[in-house]
Image (tube, rainbow, N blue to C red):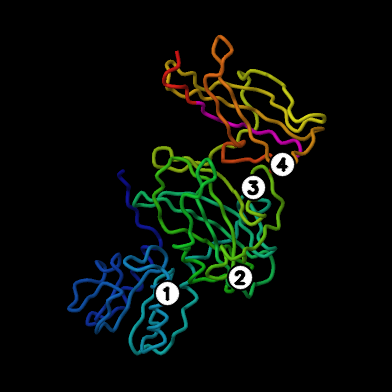
Amino acid sequence: NYQHYTVSDHDRRAAGIIAQIPVEAKVSAQDKLDPHVAGRQTIYIFPKVDDADTLFVDVTGPAWPQHPNDLYRDLQAYLAGDFGIAAGDDGYLLLRKGAVTAQIPDDFYNAFRRPLLVSQPITQPVAIFGGQLALWDHQVTVDEHGETVVQLTWQLVDAPVATDYRIYVAFADRDGNVLHDTLFYPPVATLWYPTSLWQRTEMVLVQTLPWSPAVDQVTLLVGVYRGDDGWNSGQRLPLSTASTPTQLHLENNTVARVGSYQNKHNRWELVPLRHVLERAAQPVDTQFGGDPAVMRLARVQITHLPTRAGEPLDFALEWHAGAGLAAAPFDYSLFAHLLNEQGEKVAQLDWQPHDDWGPRPMTTWFATTALVDQQQLLLPADLR
C-alpha cells in the first residue's frame, strides 16, 4: 500500500546533530541516516566502524542491521573506550573520538517524554502495575512504511522507582493465541530511558518496534516485569487495579487485556465491545446452571444465513450473569447444535465463551455482566 511520507519533528531534530559533524570527519552512521551524512571521503554503515572517528545513530526505532540490544551494547563499549558524547537530542546520539564526556545529554530523552495529559478527558489510568507504573493510554498505529506500531503512555504512580522494569506488549488473535510479542524485540524506550530515570511529573512514551500482522483484528495485551527473563520466570508485576469487563486481567493478574483493534483501509480502529444485541435479535430468556442459575441467554441473532452447503452460519448470543444469578464455579464450555427438519443433528460447534475482543471464560464474568458472543458454525459440505 502507498504510504505518504511526512517530515516529523523528530526528523527535523537530526539536522541540528548533522550540522555539528565536521566535513573532514570519518563517519559511521546507521543505514537510515547514511544518506544525510554522505558526500565525504570516508563513510561507513554502522556497526562497521574501522577508522571512523564519528558515530551517528538514532536509537528510537529499528536498529537494522543490528538488534536494538546489540546497538546499546556496542555504543556503551565505545563510550567505555576512546569515544565520548559530542551531541544528543531526541533519541539521536553523536559520538566522537576524543570527546571527554560519556554522559548522555538530558535532551536525548525527549524522544521518550510526553507532556502530562492535563488537557485530555482521562480521569483514571487504564491499568496500574505493582502500585508503581500507570498505563494511561494505548494506540495501535501504522507507520510511514505501512507497518504496525503500538504506542503506550505511562506515568509513575508516586515516587521514583529504583528498579528498571520491562514492558511486555503482545498481540493475540480472537482465540487468545499470542501472534507476536516483545520478548525478543523489546521496546527501545526502557532500554535507553529505563524506569529508574522516569520522573513523576512526566508521561513516558513506550513504543514497540514495527511489525506486520497477518490478520485484520488483534487484541492488545500489556504487562510489566523485571529482569531479562522475568516474564517467563515469575518476576511479573501484578495489577493493582481491579479487573473490569473492558480491562480484563489474565494470567494470574499479570496481563491486562486493554483493547482490540481492527484494520480498516490500512488504519487500526478500536473494536467496540458490545454488551447487548440490537433489537432485531430474537429474545429467548433461557437460564442455565441450576437453581440459582449461573447465566442467562437473553437474545440470539443470526448475522449471516448461508445459502448452500459448506458455507458458514454466523450467529451471536447475548449472555447475562449476576443480578441474582450465582457466580460460575468454573469455566463452562458452550455448544450449539444445528438440526434438520426431522430434528436430526447435522452440525455442532463447541467453544469457550468469547466477547468481541477474545475469550471470556465464565470465571471472568462479573456481577451484572452482559456480553455478546459472536460465533460461526460451518455447514457440512454434504448437507441436503
The answer to which image quadrant residue 97 occupies is: bottom left
Mark 4 highlights which residue?
330
- The residue lying toward the viewer, choosing from 282 and 44, is 282
Quarter of the image with the N terminus in it: top left
Judge the density around disc 3: few (<14), some (14-19), many (≥20) Cα neighbours within 10 Å.
some
Pinpoint residue 25: horizontal percent, then vertical percent.
Answer: 25, 82
**Label drawn at residue 224:** none
Mark 2 highlights which residue?
199
Residue, far top: 341
Q: Are marks 3 and 4 in contact (CB under 8 Å)?
A: no
| Mark-to-mark CA distance, 4 and 2 | 43 Å
Q: Which residues are magenta?
A: 367-377
Dominant SS of magenta comes to strand
Mark 1 highlights which residue?
72
Residue 264 to residue 121: above or below: above
Residue 199 to residue 54: above or below: above
Pinpoint residue 210: horizontal percent, then vertical percent.
Answer: 40, 55
Marks 2 and 3, the one that precedes in the sequence: 2
